[in-house]
Image: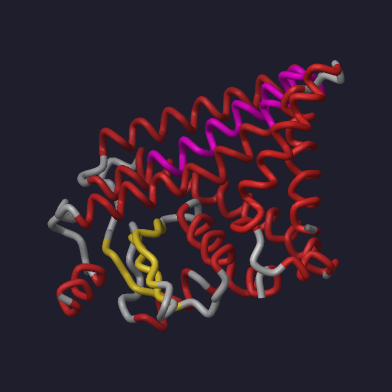
């Protein structure tokens, strides 16, 4: 029974990973691409690892998979944050149809 | 000293979970590494150890994890819908929101959970004035108060109780 539920979780995870990668190709600029890749890939990979935990049960592999989820959820947003911030600082423009950019307004006001 | 003991116990537990064996060589290596970790990180790990004693914090933290998991799931459905929609319904922009959280751990948690919440991603934090710059893939309000109401409130209310 647990194995079947594990397979279902792995399937859901693969689907979300696929949507994340599709977003990486379809969205117009760096920031929107980061949105899609970070969100979908974090939950997708967590779901695959959780499926692995259900499949293996409480064993060396299963516990490592659970710990990997914790590390992934804690560190993936930090990498997105660093990428977005350094891209903005080094002058990567937002998409031309973007509504507003308060960050560069404030930066210009300071300097 | 107390902080060091807490870190030692946490690091050793993590080691036991990761190695998943009670062979003496592994245990000895684990103690050695946990001692090293607790001496290196004791000064930067905790700002205020006394808040460990409030039990209500742990309950709020459990509630926060459930809320966060639900928001994360919604974020993924939302993101998937935007990706497969033929017209790409996005309306992006960077907005500025205000937060009342002061502690570093609280701000880190807030920024990280906003990144995994539907449609928002933290770009920068202004720690002195408590401003967060957020890239929003579907901008509904541009001024600070309205955006704060829509984006930050839900998580901030809970985080204020966990990291006062």
Instruction: Decide: is A15 above or below B160.
Output: above
State the image coordinates of residue A42 (x, y, percent, origin top left): 51, 38
State whether the magenta stretch is mostly helix, strand or loop: helix
Indicate whether residue A43 is drawn in magenta.
Answer: yes
Report the span colored magenta.
A37-66
- Residue at 76% from the left image edge and 17% from the top image edge: A56
Give the side of residue A110 with respect to residue A53, left or right.
left
Which part of the image, by quadrant, shows the N terminus of chain B?
Answer: bottom right
Asked whether residue B44 appears in the rendered view, the answer is yes
B73 or B48, which lies in front?
A: B48
Q: Locate residue A105 relative to residue A53 in the image: left or right.
A: left
Q: Is residue A57 visible?
A: no
Q: Quadrant of the C terminus of chain B?
A: bottom right
Residue at 76% over, 70% down = B51
| x 70%, y 73%: residue | B161
Q: How is the image coloured?
A: secondary structure
Residue A37: % across, % down: 39, 39
Task: Report the number of numbered marks.
Answer: 0
B45 and B133: which is toward the camera: B45
Image location (x, y in percent) of residue A96: 13, 57
Would you say A76 lies left or right of B33 here? left
């Amino acid at each position: 029974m647990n194995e079947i539920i594990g397979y279902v979780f792995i399937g859901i995870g693969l689907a979300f990973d696929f949507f994340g990668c599709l977003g990486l190709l379809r969205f117009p600029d760096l920031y929107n691409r980061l949105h899609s890749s970070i969100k979908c890939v974090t939950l997708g990979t967590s779901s695959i690892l959780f499926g692995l935990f259900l499949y293996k049960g409480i064993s060396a592999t299963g516990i490592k998979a659970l710990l990997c989820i914790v590390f992934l959820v804690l560190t993936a947003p930090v990498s997105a944050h660093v990428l977005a911030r350094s891209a903005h600082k080094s002058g990567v423009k937002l998409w031309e149809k973007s509504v507003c950019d308060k960050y560069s307004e404030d930066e210009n006001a300071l300097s | 000293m107390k902080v060091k003991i807490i870190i030692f116990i946490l690091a050793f537990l993590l080691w036991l979970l990761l190695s998943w064996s009670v062979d003496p060589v592994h245990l000895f290596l684990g103690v050695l590494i946990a001692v090293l970790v607790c001496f290196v990180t004791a000064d930067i790990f905790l700002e205020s150890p006394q808040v460990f004693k409030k039990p209500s914090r742990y309950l709020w933290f459990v509630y926060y994890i459930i809320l966060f998991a639900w928001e994360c799931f919604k974020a993924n459905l939302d993101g998937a819908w935007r990706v497969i929609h033929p017209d790409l319904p996005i309306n992006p922009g960077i907005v500025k929101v205000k937060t009342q959280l002061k502690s570093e751990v609280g701000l880190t948690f807030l920024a990280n959970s906003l990144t995994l919440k539907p449609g928002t991603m933290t770009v920068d934090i202004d720690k002195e004035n408590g401003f967060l710059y957020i890239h929003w893939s579907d901008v509904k309000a541009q001024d600070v108060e309205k955006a704060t109401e829509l984006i930050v409130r839900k998580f901030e209310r809970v985080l204020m109780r966990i990291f006062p």
